[in-house]
Image: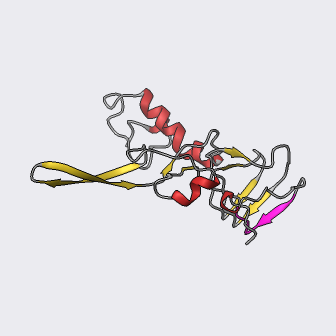
Amino acid sequence: MPNYAFTRGLSLPTATNGQTFEGYNFMQVTPNTDIFVGVTGLTFKKCNLINCKVPGDAIIEDSINIQKSLCANLHPEWVAKGVPSEVENCAHVTDTDEIWIDGVLVDTVYHYEDTTVPPTAMILPKMFFASMLFPVLFIIGKTITDNPVITRRNIFNPFLWGKK
């Protein structure tokens, strides 16, 4: 697997229009980092695209494509690679354990987790809109009293609501 992750300190390879990358690691330190700006027709297969924002026409197959805020307290070795330093009680804290002795707080142990952040632009499959969004919009526009019978059979067809 060619590894161009930020942890390696390497620059991204040069990409050409229509190029296919298979098994590459392009992990970036900052969420929503643009990669291969201006290159069109790229395909990513089985790639690590954590924190990468690929060109809008790119095809992504069997790849990790998420945005993560990386916690320096979890990965102190990555601070030298660009992960911002953080205070102990940072936004990544998921839980704390307080240590008390004779009624005095002597220490706090922080538990951290890298957090998922939303992408700046979400590309959703067309079927998402057809199967999920439109029925929800129609349901929001109607009240239950207007539609006493909304069944599994007619949930996706608002013209059948109220009919058995």
Q: Position of residue 133 (x, y in %)?
A: 53, 39
Q: Residue furthest left?
A: 102
Against 136, is 151 above or below?
Answer: below
The image quadrant that residue 78 belongs to is: bottom right
State the quadrant of the C terminus: top left
Is 93 a magenta residue?
A: no
Name the residue at 73% across, 69% down: 23
State the quadrant of the N terminus: bottom right
The image quadrant that residue 62 belongs to is: bottom right
* Span shown in magenta: 19-25
Q: Nearer the viewer, residue 154 or 62?
A: 62
Name the residue at 44% across, 49% down: 153
Image position of 6 (left or right of 22): left
Name the residue at 55% across, 60% down: 77
Image position of 15 (left or right of 80): right
Tally the marks.
0
Q: Position of residue 137 (x, y in %)?
A: 49, 33
Name the residue at 66% across, 53% down: 28
Image position of 2 (left or right of 105): right
Colour mapping used in the image: secondary structure
Is 24 a magenta residue?
A: yes
